[in-house]
Image (cartoon, rainbow, N blue to C red):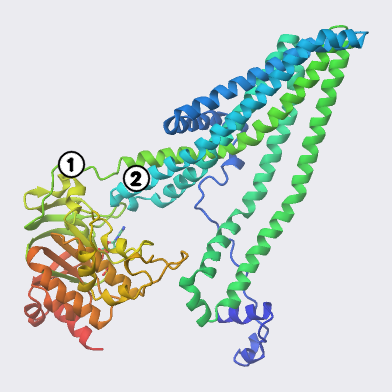
Amino acid sequence: MASHEQAARTETGEVGTSDAAVSVPAARTGVPQPAAPPELDYNGRKHRRAMDDATLWDMARRIPAALIQTARLAWRVDRRMALTIVVCQLLSGIGTAVMLGAVAQALPQLMAADPRAGLARAWPALAVAVVAMATGAAMWILADWATRRLNPKIASAADLELVDLHMRAELAAYDAEGFGDRSQAAEIGALRAVDLADDAKTLTNGLVQLVSAAAVLTSLHPLLLGVLLLSVVPRGLGGVIAARVDYRVHDRTISARNVRGMMRWWLTTAELADELRANTMRGYLHFWYRAMCDRVEGRELEGAKPYLRITLLAASLGGLFTLGMWASLAGLVLAGSMSTAIAGTAVVASQTAGRALNSIIRYSTVMFHHGLYLSDYYEFIDEVRAMTTARGTAQARAPRQIRLEGACYTYPGKETAAVHSITLTLNRGEVVALVGENGAGKSTLIRMLTGLTVPTDGTVQWDDTDLAAADAETVWRHVGLVPQKNGHWPLAARENITLGQPREHGDERIWAAAEQVGMTKALRELPDQLETLLARSVWGGHELSGGQWQRLACARAMYRQPAVLVLDEPTSEMDARGEHQIFRELRTMAPDRITVVVTHRLDNVRMADRVIVLEQGTVREQGSFDDLVATEGSLLGELYALAQDR
Ligand SMILES: Nc1ncnc2c1ncn2[C@@H]1O[C@H](COP(=O)(O)OP(=O)(O)OP(=O)(O)O)[C@@H](O)[C@H]1O
C-alpha cells in the first residue's frame, strides 16, 4: 500500500517522491507505479448478460409472461385503473383501424379529376378519420393518466410485500445459500415495478396499432400484409440488433460502474472520513477512483463506433426495404392489381406500423429485462413466504423456567452443529452469564432460547410450551434483546426507546428507562430532547456516540420489562461508569425475569448467579463464578487468568 500511496500522490501531482526514494533499495529506485484496479466482476446483478445470451425466440416467449405478471400486479392494486388502460388500448386500436379505413375511402374521391367534387364527396370519410385520430389520442392520454395512478401503487405494493416478508422470514432463510443474491434480484424487480405499467402500456399500444394497421391493410388487399411485413420485419430485426449492441456496450461497463458506485459510498461517507484522512489514504483512493472513471469512459467511447455502424446499417436496410415496398406498390398499381388510392393507404398504414414497431422493439427489450427481474421477484416471494415464522398456534406465556433438552443447532449448509446436545434449565429470578471463546456458540444458544431459531434437534421449552410449536410473535412479546449489533434506528430518541412497544400517553417510563442506563442527561441535552431525530445523515438529525447508542439499546430492552431479558455483549463500547450502572440495574431487575448476559469482560461475570461456559458448541462447565475460577483446569479460570495478565 505504501508504494501505491507514494505513486498515487505523484499521479495527483501533490507530493514529490525524492524523500521516499531514499528508503527504497537501490534495485527499486524507480518510482513504483500503483497497479491498476483489478477487473472486478460484480455478480450481484443476476441477469446482466441475459439479454446478450437470449435468442429472439427466448425474448418473444418471455414478454407475454412479463405482461401477464404486470397485469396481475395492476389488477391487484387498482382494478379500475387496470381496466381503464385495457379499454383505452382497445379503443385506441379501433381508432387507428377506423382512421386507416376512412383514409382508404377518402383517397379515391380525392384523386378524382375534379378536386372540388372529390373533396365534397370525401369529407364525411375525412371527418371520420379526424374523429378516429382524436379519439385515439384521447385514449392514449387517458391510458397515460391511469398508468400514472397505477405506477406508484404497484411500486409500493411490490416493495411493501418484499420488505414485510423479509421481516417475517425465519432467520434460517438469511443463511440459505444465495439468499442475498436472490433478495437483491427481487429488490431490483420491486424497484423496476415503478415503470412496469408504463412500459407495458407503451408496448401493448404498439402491438394494438400494428395489428390494426395489418388488419386494415389485409382487408383492403390480401397482398398488402406481405408488403407491410416486407417493410417492417427488416426494420424490426435491425432495431433488435441495434438494441443488443447498445446493451453489450452497457454491459462492458457495468462492473466498473457498480464497483465505482460502491467505492463512491466509501469515499464520501462520514463513517470512513476519519480513517481516510488520518491514514493518508486519499491519494491512492483518488488514483483508484480516477482509473475506474477512465475505464468506464474509455469503454463507452469504444462502443460508440460499432453502435454507429449498426444503427446506420439498420437504417439503410430499413430504407431499402421501404423503397422496395414502394416499388412493389408501384408495380401492383402499374399492373392494375391495385388502385392508386389503396396503395396510398398502404403507405400511410406502413408509417403507422413503423412507429408502432419502434415502440414494440424498444419496449420489448425493456419488458424482457423487467420480466427476468419480475420472475425473480415472484420466485423470491414464494421462497420467503414458505419460510415465514408460522410454526404453531400455541400461545407462549411469560416463562418461569426455560428448559433446553438435547438442543442442537446446525446452520443451513453447515456440516457441524454450532451448538449441540445442550441440556439446561434457566429459572426466573436468576441472572445467568454465558461465557466462552469466539465462535463457542453463545449467540446461537441465545437465539434458540428466545425462539429466534428453532433447534434443528432437541427441544426448547418455556414452561410447558415447546417453542417449535408456539406462535413466534407470542414468544417475542416476552423477550427483551440487546444483540451484539443493535440498530441505530433513524428515528426520534423516543422511538429509539419505545420501538416495538405500544404507544403510551406519558413519557415517564421512557425517562425511567433512560435513567436506568445513565442517558437522562445526554437525552435532555439533545436539541429537541426525546423528539430529536437520531440520524446524522438526515437534515436536522443528531448523532450519538457508540457507547450512547449501546446504552439506548439497553434502555429499549429494559423499557419492555420483559420476562426474558437477554443481552449479548451489552457494554462492549461503554465506559466504566455505564458498564457498572447497566450490571447494577440488571441485578435490580432480576427477580421478575430470567436474565441472560453474554460478556467477554469477565469481571462483570461475578454479578451472575450462575456462569455457563460454552466450548465448541457444548456446555463445558457451569456454576458460580468463584467456584469455577477456583476449580483446577476450568476454562473460566484460564480465561480469567489471561484477562488479569495484561
Ligand atoms: N449465520 C451463520 N451461518 C453459518 N454459521 C454461523 C452463523 N452464525 C454463526 N455461525 C457459526 O456458528 C458458530 C457459533 O457462532 P456464534 O456466533 O454462536 O458464536 P459466539 O460464541 O457468539 O461468538 P462471539 O464471541 O465471537 O460472538 C461459529 O463457528 C460461527 O462461525
Position of the C terminus, as image quadrant, is bottom left
Say what amino acid the circle numbered 2 marks: Leu
Please give left or right for residue 337 compared with residue 603 in the image. Answer: right
**Residue 40 appears in the picture as rendered:** no
What is the crowding at mark 1: few (fewer than 14 residues within 10 Å), some, or many (at least 20)?
A: few
- Front in this rendered view, residue 46 or 488: 488
Tell me residue 130's x, y (percent): 73, 19
Q: Residue furthest front?
A: 506
The numbered mark, 1 or 2, whose residue comes first in the sequence reads 2
Q: Which mark, by number, is residue 90?
A: none
Tell me residue 443's x, y (percent): 24, 63
Judging from the image, what secondary structure is the residue with disc 2 in? Answer: helix
Please give left or right for residue 130 compared with residue 108 in the image. Answer: left
Whether the residue under disc 2 has CB within 8 Å of ligand 1: no
Tell me residue 57's x, y (percent): 59, 30
Circle 2 sits on which residue?
165
Tell me residue 345's x, y (percent): 79, 16
Is residue 327 depicted above or below 527 in this figure?
A: above
Residue drawn 78% across the image and 10% down it: 105
What is the crowding at mark 2: few (fewer than 14 residues within 10 Å), some, or many (at least 20)?
A: many
| Ligand 1's quadrant | bottom left
Is residue 503 depicted above or below 592 in this figure?
A: above
- Front in this rendered view, residue 592 or 129: 129
- Front in this rendered view, residue 142 or 207: 142
Q: Residue furthest right?
A: 113
- Front in this rendered view, residue 258 or 516: 516
Circle 1 sits on which residue?
392
Judging from the image, what secondary structure is the residue with disc 1 in? Answer: loop
Residue drawn 31% across the image and 72% down it: 523
Residue drawn 48% across the image and 78% down it: 274
